[in-house]
Amino acid sequence: MRLEPVDASDARAVLRGLRGAVLGAGPAIALGGTDLPAEVPAGTAVVVTTSGSTGYPKSVVLSRAALTSSALATADRIGDGAWLLALPPGYIAGVQVLVRALVAGHEPAILQGSFSASAFTAAASAMASSDGGRAVPAYTSLVPAQLQTLLDDPEPATARALARFEAILVGGQVLAPALAERAAAAGARIVRTYGSSETAGGCVYDGVPLAGVGMRTVDGEVELSGPTLAEGYLGDAALTARVFTVDPDGKRWYRTGDLGEFAGGHLRVTGRADNVIVSGGINVSLDRVERVVRTVPGFGDAVVVPVADPRWGQASIVVAAGSGATGTDATARVRAAVAAELGPVARPRAVLGVAELPLLASGKPDRAALRDLAEGAAGPSDAE
């Protein structure tokens, strides 16, 4: 099947490409990536090149069947209706907003220009609320940073726009508890999603897998199966074989690289298997540290990154935006919270305040850039 590059920043172009790739006879479309082959396996709909926020970019091959299975399973869980695209269209979360709209038979609403509260409100207000006299539920998908922008906006129209959606999918990173509480108080119906490009987007909603999705842990690592799995990585058979495994019954599983546990049938992701530092000979999960830091007032969007430490080998620094993230008091509050929850060895070395967090086009924190900032600002080793 022919693979055709599409401008991943042009939502209308991506929509046209998906209409042919998912509902028609193709060609498959490539979103991002360079030096990709002109031909891909039959049945391919999209090749999405991941953002590479913590590693190197990978080109994920997604079939028409995987994308439509995900869209149908989402409709089965939260309902069918019209969708508003407020995410970048070149990443899987944005792709799936468009695919869900196409599968449902509704033309998606598309937020024009840069994301802002006023742009979101205008796009939401323009969505049709009925079709032939039948009410049409509205849905959208956001990342936490976008949700915070909307909740911070004082205009009553923004709150009304949030409340009109039947469900708002939020994924891409952990949703801070304080932000979730604010959203609920504003009348926003939030659904936390978990997934990746390799699973055709979110496939676990509020800790529960979508219909047809299997879930297990192997040595603490979360693995997923089902019809939404990608075919693998384009041009990298070795990585495909390492990440997508087959059990004795012939079922394919995707190794997520996330650590997790099950409680009452719900998945709780506890961190990345590879986001661990060794500080003074003790393993410290930076995901767990970050989760605690985000419970401290003023640090809801903070990011914890590793730095070299001359005394302990490795340490961590908290990078946060806003006036509340500066000063010795801020550092003391964060260190005390982490020590109380995880022990003294897990305490971040310091807090680095910035005007705003650098983000990738996907809306996720640019952890590579944040590590560079932290290394450049790293202070003396914690001697306690």
Image (cartoon, rainbow, N blue to C red):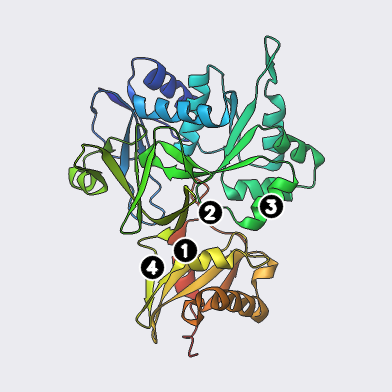
Residue drawn at (64%, 76%) of the image: 333
326 vs 11: above or below: below
Chain-order first, disc 3 or disc 4:
3
Q: Which amino acid type is marked by label 4?
A: Val
Q: In this rendering, which labeled residue sits more in front, label 3 or label 4? A: 3
Q: Position of residue 374 (x, y in %)?
A: 48, 71
Disc 1 to disc 4: CB gap under 8 Å: no
Q: Which residue is mark 4?
A: 276
In-image side of 155 versus 364 (left or right): right
Residues 180 and 109: in front is: 180
Q: Which amino acid type is marked by label 1?
A: Asp
Element on which disc 2 rests: loop
In-image side of 112 versus 77 (left or right): right
Q: Residues within 10 Å of mark 4 (few under 14, many from 20)?
A: some
Residues 48 and 341: in front is: 341
Quarter of the rendering containing residue 113:
top right
Element on which disc 3 rests: helix
Give the spatial CA distance, label 1 vs label 3. 21 Å
Q: Position of residue 267 (x, y in %)?
A: 46, 50
In-image side of 250 versus 362 (left or right): left
Q: Which residue is mark 2?
A: 174
The dot on residue 287 is 1
Give the spatial CA distance, label 1 vs label 2. 10 Å
Residue reaching furthest to the top: 132
Element on which disc 4 rests: strand
Q: Residues within 10 Å of mark 1 (few under 14, many from 20)?
A: many
Give the spatial CA distance, label 2 vs label 4. 17 Å
268 vs 24: above or below: below
